[in-house]
Amino acid sequence: MKLDSKYFDRIRTRRKREQETDRSVTTCQWDGCDKPGIHRAPVGRNAEGQFFLFCFEHVKEYNKGYNYFSGLSDGEIARYQKEAVTGHRPTWTVGVNKAARSGPMHADVRAGTSTRFKDPFGFVQNGRDRGPRFQQHSRKLKTLEAKAFDTMGLGANATAAEIKARYKELVKKHHPDANGGDRGSEERFRAVIQAYQLLKQGGFC
């Protein structure tokens, strides 16, 4: 529609006239006041979308004493505020409704006790049976962690058991008592201990 259309001008003019007519006819709904009521004030709870029309002075007076929760107990107010977070729509925790029990987020499925959930690629694992698929992925190591693995002669995907076994092997091999006090062996011994402690602090073993 063009801005200079006669229909466009007629719509605008008609709306403006209706507003002026409403404002001139409606008087303030405050008892004993005959001023124009052009300011809206909410009626209250359980009457959403309904408004009183007051003049400027009386709408200020009305708003001072307005309380949407008037007549409600503290418990009812708290419940209303909690339900307002979700827009007063029903909610439930994961796994409560019947349809969610077969979902991948249900506790039984995550624990591996559900027979409804199929996992052909091994993406879901429980704490008792850690499949090799997840241990094959390369870890993102920090510089010191990568150096510690290199010191112990292990790859980044080494398991905790492999790290501990390698540590015991290197400690026996490079212990000063087993090498007659050799300086090179002693430095290697210290480097292995430091590397193992770093990996232990990082949760690798």
Image (cartoon, helix red, strand yellow):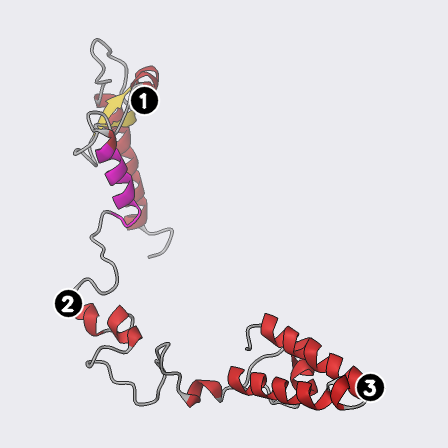
> Which residue lies under the disc numbered 3?
181
Query: Is residue 84 magenta-colored?
Result: yes
- Cα separation, mark 1 vs mark 3, equals 90 Å
> Which residue lies under the disc numbered 2?
98
Q: Marks 1 and 3: CB-CB under 8 Å?
A: no
- Cα separation, mark 3 vs mark 2, equals 70 Å
Q: Earlier in the sequence, mark 1 or mark 3?
A: 1
Q: Amino acid at mark 3?
A: Gly
147 up-or-down from 56: above or below: below
Q: Amino acid at mark 1?
A: Asn
- Cα separation, mark 2 vs mark 1, equals 47 Å
Q: Earlier in the sequence, mark 2 or mark 1?
A: 1
Q: Earlier in the sequence, mark 3 or mark 2?
A: 2
In the rendering, at what x and y percent does residue 117 appear? Answer: 23, 81
Query: Is residue 151 magenta-colored?
Result: no
Name the one closer to the observer, 177 or 142: 177
Main secondary structure of the magenta stretch: helix
162 up-or-down from 93: above or below: below
> Which residue lies under the disc numbered 1?
63
Tell me the magenta residue range. 75-87
- Which residue is depicted at the point 17% across and 63% down? 97
- Which residue is depicted at the point 65% across and 84% down? 149
